[in-house]
Image: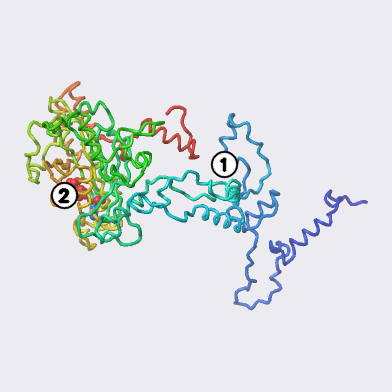
Amino acid sequence: MPTILPSRTMHGPSQADLDILALLTSESSALGPLSSSQPNHSHEHRTPGKKRQFPPRRESPMDALMISAVLAGSGPVTRHHLNHGISRPGAYASCDESRPSSPSRPPIPSKVVMKSHQAPRSERLKVEQEIKTADHVPSSPTDDNGVAIPSSSRIESSPLASRSPIANSLSSSYGSREISKPRRRMSIDPTSVTQTLQKAASPSNTNFFHSTQSAIPKVPSGRPQVRCMARTRIPTPHGEVFLHLYHNSHDNKEHLAIVIDPIQLSPDARARAPKGRREIRSQSLDERWREGETDMERVVRGAYVGRLIPGSEGQASGPQSTRDSQRIEEEGDVLDGMEVVDESDESDILPLVRIHSECFTGETIGSMRCDCGEQLDEALRLIALSQPVPQTSTSTFDALPTPASSRSPSPSATATSSSQPLVPGRGVVIYLRQEGRGIGLLEKIRAYNLQDLGHDTVTANLMLGHGADERKYNVAAEILRDLGLNDGIRLLTNNPEKVEGLAGEGIQISERVGMVPRDWKCSHSSPRRVAKDLQGVEAEEVEYEDWRTRRAGVGLIGAGAARGPELEKYLRTKVERMGHLIDIPDKI
Ligand SMILES: Nc1nc2c(ncn2[C@@H]2O[C@H](COP(=O)(O)OP(=O)(O)OP(=O)(O)O)[C@@H](O)[C@H]2O)c(=O)[nH]1
C-alpha cells in the first residue's frame, strides 16, 4: 500500500531550506543551537555533589531590532545604525492620516522601510567644518565705544548666504535640524553690555553676569549692581503684570520683579489714576545697551511702551531721561523760565511692595506647611486692588514697625469701607530666589524632617548648622532703586527684619501693611459668624465676600481652574504646532 506523505514531504525541502536548517542548527550558528541540538548533558562527566558545569553563555550578536527588521524584509541592518529609525513615511501622523486636508500624502506602504536621519560621520564632520568656517568672522566689528560686538549680538542678514554650496546642499539634504546650531540674531543677550558694565564696575566685579557659571561668585564690597535683562507682560488672575528678570553682581540667581502698573496697559486706568503718577519702569532695561541698537532689539527685551499688539512692531521706549523730558515738554510744563509744576505732588497712593522669598513647596506643590503660596497670591491681589487716596499724606506716617502697625488694615478693608473715588492699585512683588529663608531647598527638606521629629523651624535650621534666617535684602533694594521705588513705599510684611533690612539699604518705607493670612481674616473679621446672624441677601453677600477672600486667585494648586483666551491659544499651539498628545475639545 502506498504511503501517503504529508504535502510538505511531497514537495520536498529545497536545497536552500536545507542550507538554512544546517546553518541554524550548527554549533557555530549566530542564534545558537536549537533545542534539538542542545548539548546532551547526560554525556557529561558529573561528580556527585558537584554542581553541573555549563559551557560559558554565548551572547547572541543579534538583537530584537535586527530580527524584526530582517523579518519585515527591510534589507541589511546592523546594530551600529544608532540614530537610524525604522519608520514608515507618515509615521507619527495617526491624526493626519485620517485628515481630509492631506490628499497629497503618499500612500503608506505596508512594508517597513529603513530611513536614515543621519549622514555618515565623515560627511557630518565635513559639514560641521564648513559651517564653522562660514560663521567665522575674521575681524570683529566694534561699536562706537570701541567695544567688540560679539557675533551673538549682530544681526545676520543671511546666515546661509556665506556658506559654500556644499554646505548649503548638505544642509538641505540632511535637514536643518542636524546642521544648524542655535544662533542669536539680536542683541538680546547683551555680552557687549556686560563688557561695558564691567568697565564701569569696580575691578573686583569681574564676575558680573557670571561669564564663568561654575565660578563661585565673589561678593563685591560695595552695593550689588543689578540689571533687568528682560521684561514681558503676563496675564494673571489679578490682572496683567510685567515680569522683570534681573541679573546681579552679588549672586548667580535670577531674581524677579512682578510689576503691577495698570496705567501702562490701559487708557482707562491711566485716566482714573492721579495725573502725576509715573510709570514703574526699569531704568537698566530702558537705557541704551549699545550704540546702534535697533528698536526691535529693544522691543524684544521688553523695553517698549504701552502694550504689544500682534502684527505691529511695538513702540520701543527711549532711555528714561529722554522720555521724562519729552513728557514734560509734551505736557507743556516747561515754560521758558516760568514755574515748573511738579505733578508728582498730586496725592496718590504709594506703591505697595512685597519682598517675597522663593518657596518651591508652598508655591508649586501647594504645601500647607507654610502659607508662602497664598502670600504670593494675596500680595498680587492686594497690590492690584483699587483704593482710595489716603486723606492724610502718607509721608508723615511712622514707617518703622510697631505692634500697632502689625495690625494695620489691609488695602482691601480700606477700599471697601471708603466712599472716596478709587484709584488703580500699583506696586511690585520682588521675588527673591532665597529658598528656605536662604538655606536652599535641600536643606529645607532636611529641616522638614527635623520638624517632623518635633522641632520648630528655627531649631531645625540651627540643628543643621544654619542661621534661623539667612536672607539678605541688598539685591531687593537695588531692584527697587532700578524701578524708581526707593523714595516712599508701603511694605507688605509682618517681618521686622525685612523692614530694617530694606531701610538699612536706603529704601524709604513710609508705611508697613500687615500680611494677614486669609483664613485669619475670614475667622477674625468673622463674616461667617456675622452671616449666621444675618438673613437673605445680606447674609449671601457676606458669605460671598468670605468665599472671594479665600479663593482670591486661581493660580494655586487646588484653588480653581485657570481659564482665558491666552491660555486657550497657548494650549492650542502646543497641540497643533508642537504635537502634544492631547485632543482639543470641540468647545473650550
Ligand atoms: N528653613 C525653612 N524655611 C522655610 C520654612 N517654611 C517656609 N520657609 C521659607 O521661608 C521663606 C518665607 O519666609 P517667612 O518667614 O514665611 O515669611 P517672611 O517673608 O519672612 O515674612 P512676611 O513678609 O511677613 O511674610 C521662604 O523662603 C520659604 O521657603 C521652614 O520650615 N524652614
Across and down, in percent, residue 403 comes to 7, 45
Kindly identify the residue that appears in the image at 89 percent across and 52 percent down.
3
Location of residue 342 by image quarter = top left
Q: Which mark, residue 502?
A: 2
Residue designated by label 1: 92
Asked if disc 2 is less than 8 Å from ligand 1, the answer is: no
Across and down, in percent, residue 551 comes to 26, 34
Disc nearer the start of the sequence (2/1): 1
In this view, the residue farthest toward the front is: 336
Query: On the rendered structure, is 105 left or right of 542?
Result: right
In this view, the residue farthest toward the top is: 536
Quadrant the C terminus occupies? top left
Q: Secondary structure at mark 1?
A: loop
Q: Are marks 2 and 1 in contact (CB under 8 Å)?
A: no
How many marks can you see?
A: 2
Across and down, in percent, residue 277 comes to 18, 33
Badge 1 local density, few (<14 within 10 Å), some, or many (20+)? few
The answer to whether one can see residue 448 in this image is no
Location of residue 335 by image quarter = top left
Q: Secondary structure at mark 2?
A: helix
Name which residue type carries label 2: Leu
User: Is 251 located above or below residue 184 in the figure?
Assistant: below
Name which residue type carries label 1: Tyr
User: Is 274 located above or below residue 7 in the figure?
Assistant: above
**Colouring rule applied to residues:** rainbow
In this view, the residue farthest toward the bottom is: 47
Across and down, in percent, residue 171 comes to 57, 48
Badge 2 local density, few (<14 within 10 Å), some, or many (20+)? many
| Disc 2 to disc 1, C-alpha distance | 56 Å
The answer to whether one can see residue 30 in this image is yes
Please name which of the two marks, 2 or 1, marks the residue nearer to the observer: 2
